[in-house]
Structures are given as C-alpha cells and as structure tokens.
Amino acid sequence: MDRLWSPWRYQYVTKSGHVAGCIFCTKSSEQHDDENLILYRGSRNFVLLNLYPYSTGHLMIAPYDHIAALEPAGEPILSEMMQLARQAEIHLRKLYNPQGFNLGMNLGESAGAGVPGHIHMHVLPRWSGDTNFMTVVGETRVLPESLDVTYSKLKKAFQGN
C-alpha cells in the first residue's frame, strides 16, 4: 500500500470539529487575522483562506453581515464581493499562474453549503489535471504548499492593493 504523508495538515485536522455559532461571524469579529487566515478586510466583506482547500490558493469572500441568501444582501455588499473576487483572481493568477478558476456559492444546506446561514463566495484556482485519481477515487487533495506559505504570499499581495 502506498502512503501519502502530509504532516503539516495535523495542526488543522486536530482543530477540526463543531464550532459554536457562525464561523464567519466569529472570525470577522476577532482581531486574530493571521490565526483566522484572514487575508484582507474590506468595508463590507473580508477575504480568507479556506482551512480545508480543494486547491492551493482556495479562498473565500464573506460579508460581515450574517445573511443566508443573496436577496437580502444590499448592493454595496454584492458589489464589493465581486470586486474582491476580481482582486483575488488577479493575485492568484500572478502568484500561481492557474489555467482557470472556479467561483461559486452554495446557498442552503441542501445545495451543499458548509455554513448554510452565511453567504460566502469560493474562489479556486484550477490547473489542467488537478482533478486526477487522487481527488476522484481517493477523495484526497494533494497540495504542493502549506497553508501558512499560501497565506503569507496572498496576504502580501492583498496588502499591496
């Protein structure tokens, strides 16, 4: 049997579990941006790395307001969310040279939302062949870089806005 070792993931796996309250509301209200992987704070939304990414650079954009759907979100929230998605694309393209991107939202638990009560947009850089047998059959992601390195690179890029 082959083994794939990723010892840097241990710190994240051991922290996993049920979190009381909304993770986005909690993280945005705290002043621990490095610990919470918050890359950038806008006036109505913030950008953070996904703790369990599908690909290197997988980030999310979430409003500070706890809203569950696009309908009650005001135009300023939605506008800034798209502007931040554009900035994320620019930074990720410059740093990682992906061949494509997935941008998306899962609204509601039945649609696959991991945090169904708080809208958030995923931005995932993609490369040809990144959905290989490891992801499809082994349900395993292979990331070439640790989250702390990715965080450092993207934090610096967003600070340069």
Image (cartoon, rainbow, N blue to C red):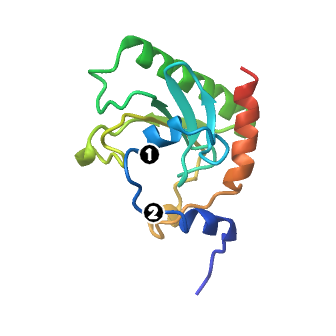
Q: Is residue 55 above or below residue 161?
A: below
Which residue extends farthest bottom? Answer: 1
Crowding near pointer 2: few (<14 within 10 Å), some, many (20+)? few
Q: Secondary structure at mark 1?
A: helix
Using residue 10 as the reference point, say whether residue 161 is left or right of it: right
Circle 1: residue type: Ile
| Rendered residue at 57%/53% (across/down) | 130
How many C-alpha atoms fall within 10 Å of the one at disc 1: few (<14), some, or many (≥20)? some
Mark 2, residue position: 136
Residue at image coords 75%, 40%: 153
Q: Could you say which quadrant of the image residue 117 lies in?
A: top left
Closer to us: 100 or 10: 10
Depicted 75 relative to depicted 13: above or below: above
Q: Where is residue 106, by image quadrant?
A: top left
Report x, y in % for residue 64. 45, 28
Q: x%, y% of residue 79?
A: 46, 15
Judge by depth and name the residue closer to the eye, 3 or 117: 117
Image position, residue 14 (x, y; %): 55, 69
Q: Is residue 116 left or right of residue 141?
A: left
Report the residue at 29% width, 33% height from top: 68
Amino acid type, residue under disc 2 in the picture? Val
- Where's the C terminus, which quadrant? top right
Instruction: Tell which of 60 and 20 is nearer to you.
Output: 20
Q: Quadrant of residue 43?
A: top right
Disc on the earlier residue, 1 or 2: 1
Query: In the rendered view of the protein, which quadrant contains the N terminus?
Result: bottom right
Cα separation, mark 1 vs mark 2, equals 28 Å
Q: Residue furthest top?
A: 75
Residue 21, percent from left and from top: 37, 47
Residue annotated with mark 1? 23
